[in-house]
Image (tube, coloured by chain):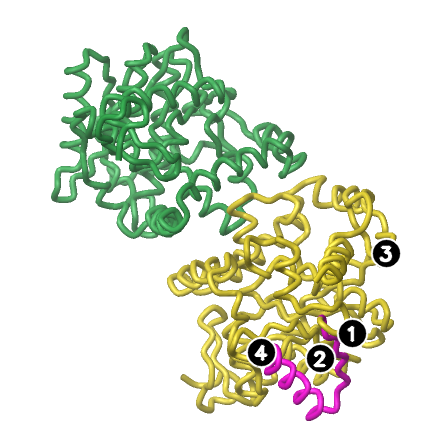
Chain colours: A yellow, B green
Amino acid sequence: MKCRKCGQKASINMRQHKLALCKEHYLEWVPEQTERFIKKYNMFTHDEKILVAVSGGKDSLSLWDILARLGYQADGLYIGLGIEEGIGYSTESHRLAGKFADEHGLKLHVLDIEKEYGQPIPVLAQISHRGHGKPCAVCGLTKRHVMNRMARDLGYDVLATGHNLDDEAAVLFGNTLQWSGEYLLRQGPVLPEAPGLARKVKPLCRLYEREMASYAILRGIEYIYEECPFANGSNSIYYKELLNKLETDRPGAKLTFYLRFLEARQNGLFGRLAAGEESDQRSHLHPCPQCGQPTSTPDLCSFCRLMEKAKSETTIQ
Amino acid sequence: MKCRKCGQKASINMRQHKLALCKEHYLEWVPEQTERFIKKYNMFTHDEKILVAVSGGKDSLSLWDILARLGYQADGLYIGLGIEEGIGYSTESHRLAGKFADEHGLKLHVLDIEKEYGQPIPVLAQISHRGHGKPCAVCGLTKRHVMNRMARDLGYDVLATGHNLDDEAAVLFGNTLQWSGEYLLRQGPVLPEAPGLARKVKPLCRLYEREMASYAILRGIEYIYEECPFANGSNSIYYKELLNKLETDRPGAKLTFYLRFLEARQNGLFGRLAAGEESDQRSHLHPCPQCGQPTSTPDLCSFCRLMEKAKSETTIQ
């Protein structure tokens, strides 16, 4: 297999794009594609300040790398979750995020959940009783809160996450199997700014997981290979496997599924709801009296309620 | 495993319903369920005349059996497709449909495509060049035309087909992977009557394929086991396999996928389109000058064009 651009030996063959490229041209192609998506979906401009949520994994480190190479003003945010589980997951991911920042002369903000809020994620999860014994629900809630708070407090225009096509297609697949209207109306490459909420963007949403792993490896980025130890057996991994089977049998099926969804919604498949209901929904939100972030619950937002609970339980102990 | 109703040994266990039943109670349960769906979706009443499209397979023969047991006025229609392919597929399915009718004292209309239109389906498919070398597109087109024509010509109020949940979920899955708006808006247990089009209903749409096979076997219905020899490698079989994997891992997933879709559409997920666009679409239709069935093409409908083509090719030979 030869590189389509230079005829040298190809390093990657992308059946879904009928495109093979050598290392050099692949490392050009990924940022070009990312830039194309940033512009297509109006994610941000070169004048805006971007906060990249960096987990130490291949996607978020590659995203940061790509944005820096494209000349965007992109700083990193590492959230220390305190998930060790015998493999030092958080310690190692923190080390790798810091190493990447140092080597590239980039600025990394760090917020450690335990230092900031008294307890690491696994303990907060036990305190909350959410999520059927898994910390994923509490972890998601906490990360959303913290990312949003940091983007606002530190004066960033936009928050960028490393979600790739496989992540997005798996979420879409789960929401479709359940026909969860509310989620189907909202999922997309950009979640616009709203009172108390930073704009959120996913510049890698059209790049396959395999493409991102290849980018990180060819680019020599050292990243944490392990999935979060709690991700085992999650819905999202299950749906990814099912979609991988589909993709193996029908190259491009995953991308088609995601892109046609975006197109169909854009073309009015979900009618009035897609345009109107979201703003209706947001009009039911009010600022949390504690943190100021929007919430639909009558009093404190879910995160601040969790923090209250954690404080009182910690005091009793 | 014991029958929930009588405590005797169960003949079938339905994990998705957490329900096990003995032969006797299962053979009561399936018609009860079917009656419930007929009423829930306003399919037809005991005063209406029903034409059941009978292929000789387990679903359509069981449907006919159930409707007769429920006291509906249900006659059968067998369409001879002329698909033999070395296994005598059409001959055998015709024999079984006829046998069932005779044994139950039911009326079976028979229309043989070759006698009526000059050529069997495989030859019509070759003449048409539709469907990438497979006769399925031409077969579907022809069956839709003939079923509709027979329902109208013979004065039936409604046309019933034996599509089961697995069929419906597979079609929905395919349409969802492509986000085919037009199909998503239309698919359902009932397609209402329209000028030139009979009402079409699917009373078995909520019963699993496995449930229908069990019904046919326990009820002693002799049916053709073979799939149509041309169905091999079809999208629909591929999607069924994928959904079966999902169902094995998560019992009930197939039913949830289908029912939540119907609910979400009912609740306005597809907004104005679901209510409005269908009638818009139908307003673009006009009667075919040859057969009178509605078509969106400017002149003859697709079926009549195929017949013209078949006639001229046959003349040249």
Mark 1 and mark 2 in contact? Answer it, CB < 8 Å. Answer: yes
Could you say which quadrant of the image residue B94 lies in?
A: top left
Earlier residue among tags 4 and 2: 4
Tell me the residue that label 2 is attached to. Answer: A67
Earlier residue among tags 2 and 3: 2
Subunit of mark 4?
A
Examine the structure image and report whether residue A111 is included in the region drawn in magenta.
yes
Q: Nearer the viewer, mark 4 or mark 3?
A: 3
Tell me the residue that label 1 is attached to. Answer: A50
The residue shown at (37%, 28%) is: B204
Q: Nearer the viewer, mark 4 or mark 2?
A: 4
Give a yes or no on whether discs 1 and 2 share a subunit.
yes
Earlier residue among tags 3 and 1: 1
Subunit of mark 1?
A
Subunit of mark 2?
A
Q: From mark 3 to mark 1, how far is it between C-alphas? A: 26 Å
Q: Amino acid at mark 4?
A: Lys
Q: From mark 4 to mark 2, how far is it between C-alphas? A: 14 Å
Examine the structure image and report whether residue B195 is included in the region drawn in magenta.
no
Could you say which quadrant of the image residue A275 lies in?
A: top right
Rendering coords of residue A103 (x, y %): 68, 93
In the rendering, which numbered label is found on residue A58?
A: 4
Tell me the residue that label 3 is attached to. Answer: A290
Query: Which span is picked out in magenta?
Result: A89-113
